[in-house]
Image (cartoon, rainbow, N blue to C red):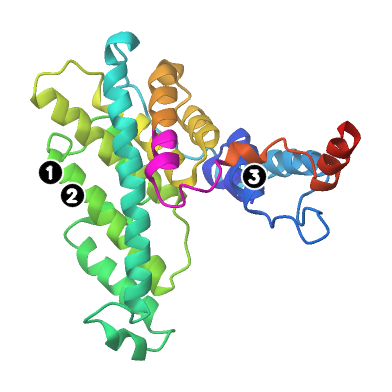
Amino acid sequence: VTAGVAAGFDAPLTAILFALEIVQPNLPGPNDDGELQGILPRSTAGAVLAASAMSTIISRAFLGDIEKFHVDAVRVLDPTTSLPTYVALGVLAAGVATTFVAFQGFFGKFYAGEISGAEFMDKVPVNIRPWIGAGLTGLLATHFPQVLFFGYETLNGLVTESATYKDSVLDLWGLCVLKMALTASCLGSGIQGGILAPSLFFGATLGAGFQELLSMVGVPTDSEATFAVVGAASVLAALFRAPVTATLLLFELTQDYKIELPLLTAVGVACMTMDILGPNKDKPPSWAFYWRPPVKAAKAVKAKKD
């Protein structure tokens, strides 16, 4: 997993945190003997770092420098005055993440024939359902090609403020909703794929549209590119409940520290909102898994104190 993320995004540091913050918390929990199944030994840390470094070196050697975001248009005003807008963006990002999870549940049931009026899908062979999901996506992509997400082309159009639809809130948020629905549809139909890259699309269109809305009502804001980048990180963080991974990924992709405070603010608010109101809100945040000792060790320490 670490090697794949490092090579795919040309982000070796993010890949390491991805393994710690997203993969590790999902390992199996304690068994009846009080032992944590699947928890890797300390020696694995060296292997994770080496895998990240080697995969990045190999991908750069064969593929060259992977295209990153161009963030020349990033502009940050006084962080103190712009802070409330990023708090609001964080709340919106959690709302988008929650909506996408709902879409996933709906389309999973739809393709399984569990939705009223769509019971016929239960009779569709499982190996045919991905063709339906792909066909629907291709049909809509003839009118909205941005949803196909070729590399970083669409996102770069937003962060460089060169996209033809960048000044329309309805177009930007419409693309966000359409991309969420089509991604959930593809996954529900059985097409194999991830949601890490799509989540960046969700957030970038959300952020750019929010900035345009603020500008329309006369609220002084940072640039649309800044909101697009911060929105991308916020939705990623809320969807995976991985604030550090999302923050570092956008740092590595943009290589721009001017967005540090807006990024940390929106990502933090998005994760807190998702933890309080979102799906699986009773599940502890991923940070809760980081440094806890093995169950046997914890019981031994407690027994010694008693």
> Residue 27 appears at what percent x and percent y?
67, 54
Tag 2–tag 1 contact (CB < 8 Å): yes
Q: Is residue 219 visible?
A: yes
Q: Label 2 to label 1, Cα distance in Å?
A: 6 Å
> Horizontally, is 5 left or right of 225 in the view?
right
Q: Which mark is residue 19?
A: 3
Residue 226 seen in render = no
Label ID, residue 170: 1
- The boundaries of the magenta stretch are 270-285
- Residue occupying the point 25% across, 48% down: 176
52 to the left or right of 141: right
Q: Which secondary structure, mark 2?
A: helix
Residue labelled with disc 2 = 174
Mark 2 Cα shell of 10 Å, populated few (<14), some (14-19), many (≥20): some
Going from the N terminus, do you reach mark 1 or mark 3 first? 3
Q: CA distance from mark 3 to mark 2?
A: 33 Å
Q: CA distance from mark 1 to mark 3?
A: 36 Å
Find numbered disc 3 in the image and state the secondary structure of the residue it sits on: helix
Q: Which residue: 36% across, 25% down?
A: 71
Q: Position of residue 180 (x, y in %)?
A: 31, 55
Residue drawn at the location 46% of the way across and 39% of the way down: 237
Q: Most extreme residue toward the front, as rendered?
A: 306
Q: Is residue 147 left or right of residue 51?
A: left
Give the residue type that dot 2 points to: Gly
Q: Secondary structure at mark 1?
A: helix
**Residue 183 at x, y percent in the picture:** 35, 60
Between 6 and 182, the one lying in front of the other is: 182
Give the mark nearest the N terminus, 3 or 2: 3
Q: Is residue 43 magenta?
A: no
**At label 3, which amino acid type do we have?**
Ala
Q: Is residue 213 above or below residue 128?
A: above
